[in-house]
Image: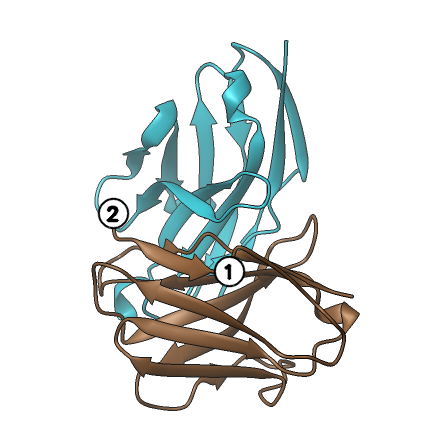
Chain colours: A cyan, B brown
Amino acid sequence: AQSVTQLGSHVSVSEGALVLLRCNYSSSVPPYLFWYVQYPNQGLQLLLKYTSAATLVKGINGFEAEFKKSETSFHLTKPSAHMSDAAEYFCAVSGGATGGGNKLTFGTGTQLKVEL
Amino acid sequence: GAVVSQHPSRVICKSGTSVKIECRSLDFQATTMFWYRQFPKQSLMLMATSNEGSKATYEQGVEKDKFLINHASLTLSTLTVTSAHPEDSSFYICSGGGGGTEAFFGQGTRLTVV
């Protein structure tokens, strides 16, 4: 079984500031981890994924995340926030290579607000 | 990445009627697809796993007679909300994968039951 905890349902940053969205996971098997972004009334767009290769994963739009097994974390960062980054972000986990296919368990989401 | 097409994007229906939502994998074959439900300001909750050629697997608490899932081909899964009620109003999203490490999501369907 897997679960995901996203700390902070709302995060507000200034344009140009560092973005840090926190995600901790629990998994009984080696997990695959994902970050998705969702704009209002739209589906989910994959930002990046960890699938047991490099622990530092670079994604689209300047985002990256680091898998830390010892901390069971997969925090999402971006060095400099842009107004267009304002959206809802979801961390998700799957059962990885051991099964579960592409079935994902999502965190509760973090709404990112970017201010001028 | 692969493309999953979901239709309609928005639908308004009267209470008591049924609504069908389609989820198509356009450039890959999907033996398994997943249906999620998202309430406003909340996360996505898995409703069911759609299996091509066999019965869907429903998550605990999801009424299988209310949310009918059909996966008759490798590229099409449908979710039918039967006898819809206002509490069924939600955002429904499907996903599928080509057997790899990533799930591809449809655009979602905003269902409003009046």
Density class for disc 2 (Cα within 10 Å; few <14, some 14-19, many ≥20) is few
Choose between A20 and B2: the one closer to the eye.
B2
Chain letter for mark 2: B
The residue indicated by pointer 2 is B1
Q: Along the horizontal axis of the image, is A38 left or right of A108?
A: left
**Position in image of residue B46 (x %, y %):** 53, 68
Choose between B52 and A75: the one closer to the eye.
B52
Work out whether residue B103 can be spotted.
no
Q: CA distance from mark 2 to mark 1?
A: 22 Å
Which residue: 69% across, 48% down?
A: B41
**Position in image of residue A7 (x %, y %):** 63, 41
The residue indicated by pointer 1 is B8
Which residue: 42% across, 83% down?
A: B70
Density class for disc 1 (Cα within 10 Å; few <14, some 14-19, many ≥20) is some
Q: Along the horizontal axis of the image, is A60 left or right of B20?
A: left
Q: Along the horizontal axis of the image, is B112 left or right of A46?
A: right
Tag 1: amino acid: Pro
**Position in image of residue A31 (x %, y %):** 36, 58
Tag 2: amino acid: Gly
**Position in image of residue A49 (x %, y %):** 33, 45
Q: Secondary structure at mark 1?
A: loop
Relative to B24, does residue A72 appear above or below in the rendering? above
Considering only order in the chain, which callout, 1 or 2, is on the residue closer to the N terminus? 2
Quadrant in the picture for residue B87: bottom right
Choose between B109 and A74: the one closer to the eye.
B109
Q: Are marks 2 and 1 in contact (CB under 8 Å)?
A: no
Chain letter for mark 1: B
Quadrant in the picture for residue B53: bottom left
